[in-house]
Amino acid sequence: MFGFFKRSKKNEEDPLSDLKTVSRWMQELPAGDIYTAQEQVVQSLIQFNHAGLAMSKERLQVLMHLDDQARDMQYSLCVQYLRNPRMSKVIESRLWTAIHAFYWEITRGYHAFLMDFVANPGGSKIQPAIPLITARALRGFADIFKWRNFRYEKVEDKLWLRVHNLYRIAEFDGFQNNRFKLYPSDAKPSSCQEEYLQALLLSPLGAGSLNPKQIEMVDLWLDNWAELVGMENRFDPALHFFYVDAAKGQGLKRVRTEMAPEASFRFLNTDRLLERIEEVQRSLKGGALPASLGLGEEFRLPDGYDLLSHVSSEWSSSNERERRIAPRASAEGRCEVLRDLGNICSRIRTEVEIATGTSPNHQLSSEEILDIKLYGFVTERTKSAITQRQIGKADMSPEQWPLHDRSDTGLGIMLKGEDSEWVKVGKLLALRLDPSQPWEIGAVRRITRLRDDMRKIGVQILDTSPLVADLDPYEAAPSLSYSIDNSSYEVQPSSQALVFPATKTSNTIIMESARYAHGRQYKLRDARGVRLIRLDSVRDKGDGWLMTTYTQVS
């Protein structure tokens, strides 16, 4: 995984040989190129961890000093990654690998010192630093887990066992609740138990239902909320709905009625945490600023409120079956899948043109027209014509996904890793099980990475029988002045969108998220004619798209 990090040559001076050398070396790193500087830090950490030297007090001071000094660079890389979700795959991979590699190597270093201490506690000179490096190692593993969750990767059992063992060290020596700042830049003190709880509470949220920005935001909240969670050795069915088995390589689990508590179990009480979330939600409704509630500068309404409701549900006493919208049933067969709003609109529009004989590039033969009149849907013969047709150079052929299960509200798909690299939470899809049926519009809600490089994709159906529409910018009395590529708003080209005439509750439309603003007016053109609409509230959103209600003005 870390092949681009090259080892230093043996004849070069080791920059981590002593505290004075590492201090001077850190000052000489390229200040204007954070990525290169952090790459050199990771190279040195790899050399440090493979040196095979004694775990002395002096070497621990070197490791801790390097960790302290490199944190600002690591933070800058993390911000760069999270603020650019649509970066190219190559850039994303390089940045993710650099960030993960630092967390991995620094945590590996602390873990090695702790294991050496456990093997010979009486002869160790680093005992005063054990609480601090235990807490740092726990946070390091939590960061590793979090960044793997960004890529929907499953955390290995052996890594969870290491985390559990680290907390056992804290419990055995009785310092699990000692509070102190892990790093000089930390805003508040923490403890080994809080760092452990933070990793546990994030584990159910990293199951592929949230995007990286959302996971990072919840992790920020837990910096202040983890202290509200109680952890006990004895089980109380009235208080405890979650537990962790320190003898097994797994994260947080829900208590089951048939469960027999064991000595390795630790039970969590989330009542105070849930009360805090309810208090925050009430304050938001009362007009309080999110930053004043510890929600962070990136918190935005209404998405942030929905995220609060989601995590409250995940940490509440209700079980998965009670929280599930509709029961699942095993399913067989395959479904056709289109991705992204532009491709979906182009495909649906092409099918309509071919079915009605209005396509400028393809006229139906008399046999095809007869098929449409007799059967009322696109036949296999016509489907072949559509599949072969292209708009420009864009192939509109749908992918074929194997079904795993389905419910009234969605589908479960099993895919190999190489077949689903582009799939991520929030991706807009069009699906259909039968070519004779209309397309259904859905969104990826959950991704679970399984063994043998398999992924389970959970898709929620948003609406059915979409019509393609064109949105033309319109403002009778412009109240907003802006330009795109030095062009005025009024002359911007129309964009494609999806409307759902079968929706009973309200008018809904799926459009490009960049073109949305509450109250903005558009001329909407579809098969039913032209009308002026005004955009209302956002109902859902994802990767480059959103679903909003609208009011017809005229």
Image (tube, rainbow, N blue to C red):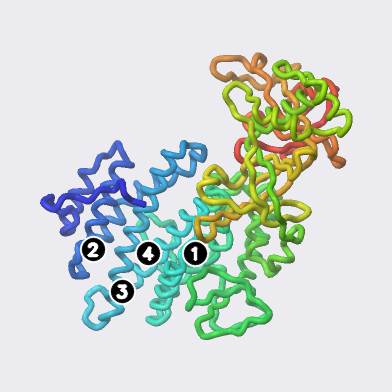
**146 up-or-down from 498: above or below:** below
Residue 260: image x %, image y %? 61, 84
Give the crowd class for mark 2: few <14, some 14-19, many >=20 residues within 10 Å.
some
Mark 3 vs mark 2, CA separation in Å = 17 Å
x 27%, y 39%: residue: 31
Mark 4 vs mark 1, CA separation in Å = 12 Å
Give the crowd class for mark 3: few <14, some 14-19, many >=20 residues within 10 Å.
some
Q: Tell me which numbered mark, 4 or 2, is placed earlier along the sequence.
A: 2
Q: Quadrant of residue 90?
A: top left
**127 up-or-down from 219: above or below:** below
Q: Nearer the viewer, mark 3 or mark 1?
A: 3
Residue 166: image x %, image y %? 40, 73
Which labelled disc corresponds to residue 199? 1
Q: Tell me which numbered mark, 2 or 1, is placed earlier along the sequence.
A: 2
The residue that label 4 is drawn on is 136
Q: Tell me which numbered mark, 4 or 3, is placed earlier along the sequence.
A: 3
The residue that label 2 is drawn on is 61
The residue that label 3 is drawn on is 115
Residue 450: image x %, image y %? 54, 59
What amino acid type should be assigned to the residue bearing mark 2?
Gln
Q: Nearer the viewer, mark 4 or mark 3?
A: 3
